[in-house]
Amino acid sequence: MRVLGIETSCDETGIAIYDDQRGLLSHVLYSQIPLHADYGGVVPELASRDHIRKTIPLIKQALLEADCTAADIDGVAYTAGPGLAGALLVGAAIGRSLAMAWNKPALAVHHMEGHLLAPMLEANPPQFPFLALLVSGGHTQLVGVEGIGRYELLGESIDDAAGEAFDKTAKLMGLDYPGGPLLAKLATQGDSKKYKFPRPMTDRPGLDFSFSGLKTSAANVIAKEGSSSQVQADIAASFQQAVVDTLVIKCERALQQTGYKRLVIAGGVSANTSLQQQLAQLLKRHGGEVFYPRKEFCTDNGAMIALAGYYRLAAGQQQDLTIGVTPRWPMQQLPAV
Ligand code: KG4
Ligand code: ZN
């Protein structure tokens, strides 16, 4: 079975073709970052319009690179939520219509399920069950995963997502949008023990997170210490360590609570090397293993959507002819496979 995947939920147009026998045949990505950089964040209307310009040319490119034609595609999967309504509608309208024109089934994919399953594209995929830490620009969630569509939400952020905290703190430091990866780069030059940032909600029981206070602490330090390049690097390193420590503490708690020995990390922030290393150490202490996608599949991409769509289409699930999106969509509402 061969599936075309379309991702347009935010500021990247990602297209991929996944074949269940041969794996990923092609994947192409167009990032809108330069388009939004002048505004310091994603402008939803500009995002939608750019997806309109890029999606069909990228589908043609992905078909060409996979050396196949529309006739070789057995199903179309597109991100239907969560995300920006207008941006999602572009991928949904194109994906659903192409599937109808090609007389093939279509599947509306949940973006976070895409992230969660992305490590399955790697050479050593995780077996079920596992604990998943989903850390992106819009979500921070701990999920118990018994199988595809068998998700238990164990904890989540009550305010900002981890990626959002990285981006907002980076912005306060004068770094370009999206600041997460730039802050992480700066952190490699800094002393992570220099400034004492809080580890929010770790002093009480439970698996929820709160990251909105961290940027206020960072703003106070920036105001007090100025912004020489060494101060900036030390703030970046100390801030990153506070986020990583918080995530590690909650993951350890969730592992103890559930008894799982495998941890999957996915979503944009899972590209953070420091987070990957410190979670690997945690799982080593627990006699378990950590799994994450290759770097380019940590952030938004079409490959994870093609893969998630494949699992559901192969199980006989499909979308009716309605072109619809679900900008707010709890992952626990998904049917099991
Ligand atoms: O999954 P993603 O591409 O988009 C959403 O679904 O939100 O995640 C993007 C987020 C942004 O907040 C970005 O700053 C963050 O992931 N991010 C990072 C790193 N790379 C991307 N945060 C920290 N360290 C990184 N290396
Ligand atoms: Zn994402």
Image (tube, rainbow, N blue to C red):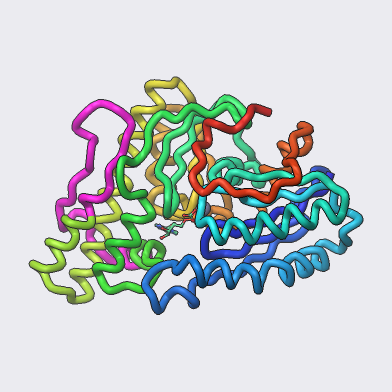
> In the rendered view, does 90 fall on the left or right side of 73?
left
Q: Magenta part of the protein: which range? A: 185-214
Residue 211 relative to residue 57: left or right: left
Residue 22 in sight in this render: no
Who's the residue at 63% across and 61% down the image? 90
Pick the quarter of the image with the N terminus.
Answer: top right
Q: Residue 233: image x %, image y %?
A: 25, 67
Q: Residue at x 80, y 52 (%)?
A: 99
Residue drawn where x is 82% and y is 48% of the image = 2
Horizontal placement of 238 versus 244: left or right? left
* Image x and y of residue 195, in percent: 15, 56
Residue 302: quarter of image: bottom right
Quadrant in the rendering for residue 153? top left
Q: Quadrant of the C terminus?
A: top right
Spot occupied by residue 101 in the image (x, y as percentages of width and height):
85, 56
How far from the left and from the top, in percent, is residue 328?
A: 49, 44
